[in-house]
Amino acid sequence: MTAVATLPTSSSVAPPQVWLRARGVPLAFRLLVIAAIALASARSGDQHGRLGPRSANRYGSRAVAELLKDHGVSVRVVTTLKDAASVTGTDATLLVTAPNLLMPHQQTTLRAATTATAGRTVLLGAGCASVGTLAPGVHAEPSTSVAPRPPG
């Protein structure tokens, strides 16, 4: 018996050739991840969210927070419901910038935490969806147009 030797044909691909052809995919993925990280870090800067006391952009409230600090008012930024419930106290004012974005169970938890204290709760942009739970007995008016006014 004679053994027939099989030689690789032009259509068969050896493992090193597979790696050479497919190495562009992982390389492209790595470049994409690096670009995304660079873009995210470049855009993070002072933008911390709408009405955020750390945000210095036109929709932030960093200037107000700094003015309050200059007058002896301590400003503490909290971003979780647990932290917000823990800072309520007799001399604390809790500012909720988007109460309509809270889920019903979060609104109930926040209301329970603020009811037991003599502190104040300020709701910005609250609508019917959140006022009924967070401030029972209070009626939300529809939003009106805003016009700039001169200082004074």
Image (spheres, rainbow, N blue to C red):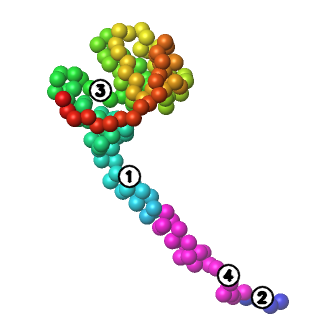
The local secondary structure at tag 1 comes to helix
Task: Classify mark 1: residues with Cα within 10 Å, few (<14), some (14-19) or many (20+).
Answer: few
Asked if the residue at tag 3 contacts the one at tag 2, i.e. Cβ–Cβ closer than 8 Å, the answer is: no
Q: Which mark is residue 76?
A: 3
**Can residue 111 be seen by looking at this rendering?**
no
The local secondary structure at tag 3 comes to loop
Q: Quadrant of the C terminus?
A: top left
In terms of sequence position, does the residue under pointer 4 or pointer 3 come before the other? 4
Disc 4 marks a residue whose amino acid type is Ser
Quadrant of residue 67 within the rendered picture = top left
- In the image, which is nearer the foreground, mark 1 or mark 2? 1
In terms of sequence position, does the residue under pointer 4 or pointer 2 come before the other? 2
**x then y, percent, for residue 142:** 47, 28
Tell me the residue at 77%/88% (across/down): 3
**Is residue 23 part of the magenta span, yes or no?**
yes
Quadrant of residue 47 within the rendered picture = top left
Q: Which mark is residue 3?
A: 2
The local secondary structure at tag 2 comes to loop
**Is residue 10 part of the magenta span, yes or no?**
yes
The residue beneath circle 1 is 40
In terms of sequence position, does the residue under pointer 1 or pointer 2 come before the other? 2
Q: Quadrant of the N terminus?
A: bottom right
Q: Is residue 136 above or below residue 141?
A: above
Disc 3 marks a residue whose amino acid type is Arg
**x then y, percent, for residue 108:** 51, 18
**Can residue 102 be seen by looking at this rendering?**
yes
Disc 1 marks a residue whose amino acid type is Ala
Say whether residue 74 is left or right of residue 144: left
Q: CA distance from mark 1 to mark 3?
A: 25 Å
- In the image, which is nearer the foreground, mark 4 or mark 3? 3
The residue beneath circle 4 is 12
Q: CA distance from mark 4 to mark 3?
A: 66 Å
